[in-house]
Amino acid sequence: MSRRWRAQFYLWGTIAAAVAVWVVLLPRIAQFSSVQDRVRKYREAGIETGAVFYSDHPAMRDIERRVDGVVNGRDPAFWELPSGR
Amino acid sequence: MSAGNSGESVVQATVAHRPWYRIEDYVTILVAVFIIGSVGLWSWMMRPLDYQELVAKSTMVKQQIAKLDPNAEGYADEKKALEGEAKGIEAKLAPMPFKNWLVRPGDWTSNPLDAFLKKGVPIYSGLAITFAILLVLLMFAVRVMGKSAMRFGIAFAVVFCMAVLSYVLAGQDVIKAYNLEYALWALLLGLLVSNTTGLPGWLEPGARTELYIKTGLVLLGAEVLFNKLLALGVPGILISWVVTPIVLIGTYLFGQYVLKIPSKSLNMVISADMSVCGVSAAVATAAACKAKKEELSLAIGLSLIFTVIMIVVQPYVVAWSGMGEIIGGAWIGGTIDSTGAVAAAGELVGDKAKDVAATVKMIQNILIGVIAFGVALYWVSFVERDTTSRKPQVSEIWKRFPRFTLGFLGISLILSYVQSQGIEGRMFVSSIVDGATKSIREWLFCLAFVSIGLESNFREYKHMLASGKPVVLYIVGQAFNLTLSFLMAWFVFTKLYPNAMELLYK
């Protein structure tokens, strides 16, 4: 087999293998209840598992709001060392 | 693609003798400023007529929430209702005219075509608009730099399609559940082409890694908002801003003096990727220290592999050890590289852990502006300096300094200031970031990873991995990170600020 044909063979062979994995194998694994539970949990919590930066999470603003609700107005607990230190 | 003296491809700032507006670093700043400026202007013009009334109403609702008595009956329901009202008002205060125009393929379970549906509605027209916006902006940049915009446009169409395919591959539920991000698939798709048939000459003009990375990073500056540094008070700063630089410097020194890794830039990119926040930190430091493309992709690959392990193991360790949700969340937030995986692992521990983990990671994310600037300065001052001169000359430093980092930091500082100007500032920044720059930045990073793959060769990876040193560096650095982050989280929440932990548990 010439070098060019071998390259084409590797390219299309890999593409065929990837199609098989993504179209046949992964959809079957996705039916497992453990995977479904995990995915549902993340989706409901507004978590983008592929986030590269904090702002990529749909739920980040809610998380910030919740944490701010605890930190804001209770400054000594988060800013000052307890007395005696 | 730019080439160094040795002919190796690098993620670098080229400051040649050309008019300043033709230099890539300045062009990327101009493009990013144009995007931010036009989105900001449009959003400002689209403000609702009753803007001031809505601002007053939002402030009133927030005051009502603050006045609620946590011990009163129906506190949770009342708080939830008021928070919902505040959210509704904020949505009106931050118009996002571009949001529906800038889309990307989403999640799917069994049919890949479902990735092109958003709430049941096809996104093909949105994708076409996204392509057109990116094409026009980038063709302009390429033209300004003196290259053929037409040749770029043709090649860009193919690179964009590969980026779309990367998002589809990353959107499958199983892949998402284990945090195998689009960056990995974009890299692999590019590598598949370059290492089988080779990169065709006509596709080369579309593989403009530096242009995509630098423009994406300057846009990322809009999300690096320094006010968020204070989100968790002193505990957040101690865990994110004290431990992280110690781990980064410690790992880098270990790589230099113990492992003696031949490439300083590879050492730096792996150290930053592992200690700060995965992909985004790796991209920022690689550009700042002019790392080779293969070094950046190797660091990201290592990080993604270990993230998959940590996302599964770490929640079990937190539960088994009984360290609790707050310390466990802070530990997860400070150690898992990927921002997405941090929230996912935190969620597996519990709601409180997720909130603390995501907040610690957010504070750590903000650090990348400072890290990128610091690394760029260190590199031009000491690593690349002329060995014949004793002291680094300011003019030499300026000549070599990657200017785009100034754009990155400048935009970050300006928008941090705007964000600090009450609710109006916050909503204005939100309309820029959530409405447009975030999506464009994501696309640019994805295009960059496809380009890196297209320009890389497996032989380079084999060469870098032959000694096993990059893997050892990652493992030792991460072990140091896990130990120091745990000790700091434990010390901060049990000894220094025990009341903070109690309040976070309530």
Image (cartoon, helix red, strand yellow):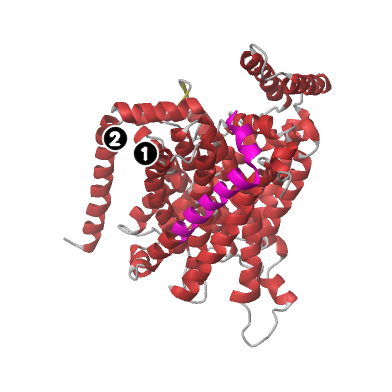
The answer to which quarter of the image holds residue B285 is bottom right
- Residue A13 position, x and y percent, is 23, 48
Q: Is residue B191 visible?
A: yes
- Residue B204 position, x and y percent, is 45, 58
Task: Tell me the number on the disc at residue B366.
Answer: none
Up the image or down, B344 lies above or below B65; here it is below
- Which residue lies most toward the bottom here? B388
- Residue B76 position, x and y percent, is 62, 17
- Determine if marks 1 and 2 fall on one subunit: no
Residue at left offset 61%, top offset 67%: B14
Location of the C terminus of chain B by quadrant is top right
Position of residue B414 in the picture relative to residue B374 (left or right):
right
Asked if marks 1 and 2 touch (Cβ < 8 Å), the reply is: yes
Taking the magenta stretch, the answer to whether it contains residue B114 is no
Q: Chain of mark 2?
A: A
Q: Chain of mark 1?
A: B
Residue at which label 2 appears: A26
- Residue B347 position, x and y percent, is 47, 33
Distance between the Cα atoms at labels 1 and 2? 8 Å
- Magenta range is B477-506
Up the image or down, B252 lies above or below B304; here it is below
Q: Secondary structure at mark 2?
A: helix
Residue at left offset 23%, top offset 63%: A3
Residue at which label 1 appears: B175
| Three-letter code for the amino acid on which mark 2 is drawn | Leu
Residue at left offset 61%, top offset 53%: B368
